Image: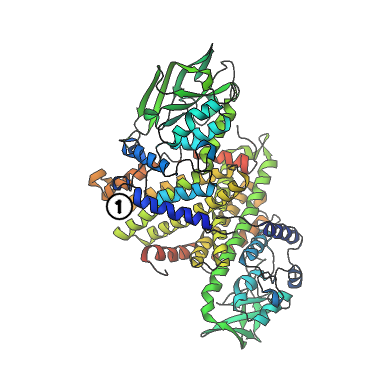
Amino acid sequence: MDFAFTPEQDELRSQARSFLAAHPEPSWAELAGLGWTGVSVPEELGGAGLGFLEEAVLVEEMGRALTHAPFWSTVAVVLPALPPELQAQVAAGEASWTLALGPLVPDLDTATRIAVVGGDSIWELDGAGREMLQTNDATRPLGVVTGGSAGRRLAGSELLPRMRTRSRAALALEACGVGARALELAVAYAKEREQFGRPIGVYQAISHPLATTYMELELARSLALWAAWCIAVDDPQAGLAAAAAKAQCAEAAVAACERSIQAHGGIGFTWEHVLHRLYKRALWIQSWDASGAQLRSEVAARLLDGEGE
Amino acid sequence: MDLRDTPDEARFRAELRDWLAASLPDGLRGHRGGAARFEGEAVREWSRALYEAGYAGLTWPKEYGGGGCPYSYQAIFLEEMARAEAPHHLGVIGLGMAGPTIIAHGSEAQKARHLSRILSADEIWCQGFSEPGAGSDLSAVRTSARLEADRFVVDGQKVWSSFAHIADWCLLLTRSDPGSERHAGLTYLIVDMRSPGVEVRPLRQMTGEAEFNEIFFSAVEVPVENVLGEVGGGWQVAMTTLLHERGTLGFALTAALEVAVRKLIELAQDRGATATQRDAIAREWIELQGLRFTAYRSLSALMKTGVPGPEGSILKLQWSEANQRLGKLALELLAQDAQLLADNAPYGGYWQHHQLRSRGNTIEAGTSEILRNIVAERVLGLPRSR
């Protein structure tokens, strides 16, 4: 039993953290140049031949940095449905993807190609119009597609549950990155901000909610990493783990942002501070795909009614 | 990263599971814990059986009679014991606290005298740390140890000592320098509980049973060779004890919670649950997995560094609150039957006992407030509140 990242994975994380801090809106070619877009693409297709754990590291860091790029849409969601030559294009930085599953399509401003479900297959959508909508989270915009027609068949729709599991796990990991940064900001502020002649971090009304936040985020992160590992080794519990992780991590990240805003006082409520942007991403994650209550009802059905065993 | 057992760990787990299935007496299966741990000879015999099978002191060095195993074996042991609903070795304080502290700070004579007898359950230990005036603030201890020639004379009172009424020995934190304050001037003694002047009084708790005791010391004589560590260096030794208390504690707690969650699911299947209750049950199951995998992450760090980190505090904090929520949820499912006790209650009163006993979980072994201070100050690096 070993529940720790390897030195190579830790190295990838620190590389990602420093790059993403300096590049909030990286181009797809830049991400490909770092080897990230093809991190799990086989070597013979120009990728690194690694797996979901490396993708997990990158996704978590992109959540922390609020990276505005179609990495989650392409790598976590659509990639398994792509035939080899299209995977090679992703690795080479020539194509990025998003999935139009419902009326609202994420990353429609940055993804170059669109996948769509029709009948028993997943297709590329050709010649569709794109209209961006006004949305809450500027770093993960939503749009709608109009017109277009089914082009190339990508895969059978039996892949959708696997894509959903990957999507949920990746969103859970993103939430961990968002929550961790919100907590770090609150801790730093509580150390430097003085009132009544002392740093406000000495007051337990400030420090205890932050301690609770740390606890919730660590427990949530354990779930996200469990889900990531299940996906990496194709464990049968992957779907259950991803549902549990998405429910818990989104909630923990939202609470972390809310407590951080409170600890910052007035400045935390301003447009200039990064907190509202972290908060909006956490809310985006919480609302996407399935709410906590919906996910828990899936989990309850498995636990109490033996569904999906 | 690999969350599966290694081949060696899997073999150990399978052997242990078979041994438990074959060796655990029916009368002890589903053992409720609580004060029942102290009753009769059965648990002591069971403790000896664990020792003879090589399951006592798994992580102790081989030279002291331990298994010399990595911490993961202890985690597997605790998981499998909980899944079999087997009672713990009677010497939990000896195995988890006294032994590791003696190994770290003890003299050769102390090691020779106590270590093997702790493993074999021939010696039961208790802990004399808390006092009526020193609960969360351990450095406020006032129990005095006065040096007279070749012995200390101890006067004072300790409280919340589990096992004291059946213990042979006590880990006692005393103030040996009467002019000293706080962490200085403390001395850590090993005290024979059969010495003249030691009096134990059980404390009846809200469950109606007595798990804890008060211990009164009136001019109790303790030979100087029973000092553990240095005279005046008691605080450092006490910190070793508390560190070991939190080391693999997370696994014992998580494994016990896993059993309770399983029983809660059975209860909901037996009696039905509303949509809101189903949501709450799913939440508890999810949080249990979060706790379980956090314990695994903490264990991986422990195996790399050898020292449990202060982040281990979150395991106890989360577990205690989860265990309380679980009990309340179960009583809600039981509806008015929740008022019945013992033989009149469904499941023999398991949930009624669980719920009341769980109120102590956020108090014992470090209150939730103290644990949040530890996380805030030692993990997050916030300024000290005191």
Q: Give the residue displayed 39% in from the left and 21% down from the top.
A: B194
The percent coordinates of residue B288 (x first, y second) are: 46, 54
State which quarter of the image contains the N terminus of chain A. Answer: bottom right
* Location of residue B85 with respect to B239 vertically, above or below: below
Q: Give the residue displayed 54% in from the left and 22% down from the top.
A: B227
The percent coordinates of residue B23 (x first, y second) are: 35, 48
Q: Give the residue displayed 50% in from the left and 34% down from the top.
A: B99
Would residue A201 be seen by someone viewing this image from the given angle? yes
The percent coordinates of residue A130 (x first, y second) are: 66, 80
Q: Quadrant of residue A42?
A: bottom right
Q: As rendered, which of B307 and A293 lies closer to the eye?
A: B307
Residue that badge 1 annotates: B334
Q: Chain of mark 1?
A: B
* Location of residue A147 with respect to B333 vertically, above or below: below
Q: Characterize the local packing of mark 1: few (<14), some (14-19) or many (20 or more) Cα atoms within 10 angstroms.
A: many
Q: Callout 1, which amino acid?
A: Leu
The percent coordinates of residue A122 (x first, y second) are: 57, 82
* SS category of the residue bearing label 1: helix
Q: Is residue A53 left or right of residue B334?
A: right
